[in-house]
Image (cartoon, rainbow, N blue to C red):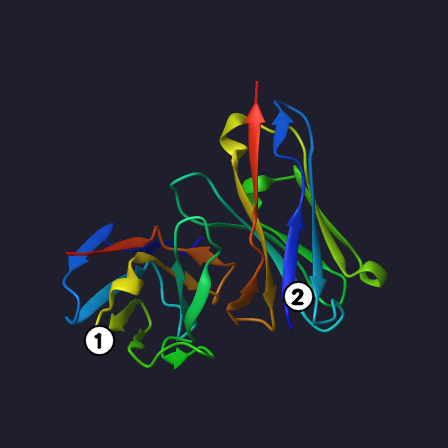
Amino acid sequence: QVQLKETGPDLVQLTQTLSITCTVSGFSLTTYNVHWVRQPPGKGLEWMGAMWNGGGTDYNSAFKSRLSISRDTSKSQVFLKMNSLQTDDTAKYFCARHVTIAAPFDYWGQGVMVTVSS
Amino acid sequence: DTVLTQSPALAVSPGERVSISCRASEGVNSYMHWYQQKPGQQPKLLIYKASNLASGVPARFSGSGSGTDFTLTIDPVEADDTATYFCQQSWNDPTFGGGTKLELK
């Protein structure tokens, strides 16, 4: 069955770099796209970026050059790296599967809660 | 960015019908999707492309709309439907509404 699982740190220091891994099973990263979405505590959802099945990426301009998404297809993993973390980056970070342009996110990971601490 | 606007909260009694609205700042054709999120859980897809029921979702849920105005309807509402409901457009770079928290009286 389709599964996505995020792993990463619970706590990151102010101005440091966040690294999260999304490990998928039940589908291929060369067939499906994987996106990153985050949710600050008690707030709404924010799209961060995408790893397309062809290997390209797209990013929300709100994250400017802070964000990088990559993958290792042999390990079925997609990686999120974001630098210069601030306290308002405290959020639950989700990865989600996406079939094609204009489609919804049909499967989501359980998310990983990351707190940025000073 | 396409801004999606939802009412923050609604309260209904079990057995009633509820409609949750989502208004887009620009037309998104029919590329609007709806998710249910319960506390501590990930979002779950309910409706895709405005009116299509996702797999395994009860027929009590339905969606309608096109262009800028969309509605998620639950009829009848059950106790387990207590959750926050988000709309999301995929016509442009994905954006989400702020969510509507549904509470039962």
Is residue B69 left or right of A100 when viewed as pictured? left
Looking at the image, residue A45 lies above or below residue A73: above
- Residue A11 percent location from the top left of the image: 61, 29
| Quarter assignment of residue B71 | bottom left
Does A110 sit above or below residue A64? below
Percent position of residue B87, x then y: 37, 62
Left or right: residue A88 compared with residue B20: right
| Residue drawn 17% across the image and 72% down it | B17
Q: Report the disc number at residue A33.
A: 2
For the point 22% across and 75% down, the residue is B75
> Which numbered dot is residue B75?
1
* Quadrant of the rendered image containing residue A50: bottom right
Chain label for disc 2: A
Residue lying farthest to the right in this orientation: A74
Decide: few, some or many residues near mark 2? Use Cα within 10 Å; few <14, some 14-19, many ≥20.
many
| Percent of width and height locating residue A96 | 58, 60
Image: A31 above or below B38: below
Q: Which residue lies furthest to the front in this view?
A: B79
Image position, residue B13 (x, y; %): 14, 63
Between residues A60 and A113, which one lies in front from this camera angle? A113
Tag 2 secondary structure: strand
Which one is closest to the eye, mark 2 or mark 1? 1
| Viewer-nearest residue: A45 or A114 | A114
Left or right of B10 on screen, residue A104: right
Q: What residue type is labelled 2?
A: Asn
- Check disc 1: other Cα within 10 Å, few if <14, some if 14-19, many if 20+: some
Q: Which residue is drawn at 33% across and 81% down?
A: B59
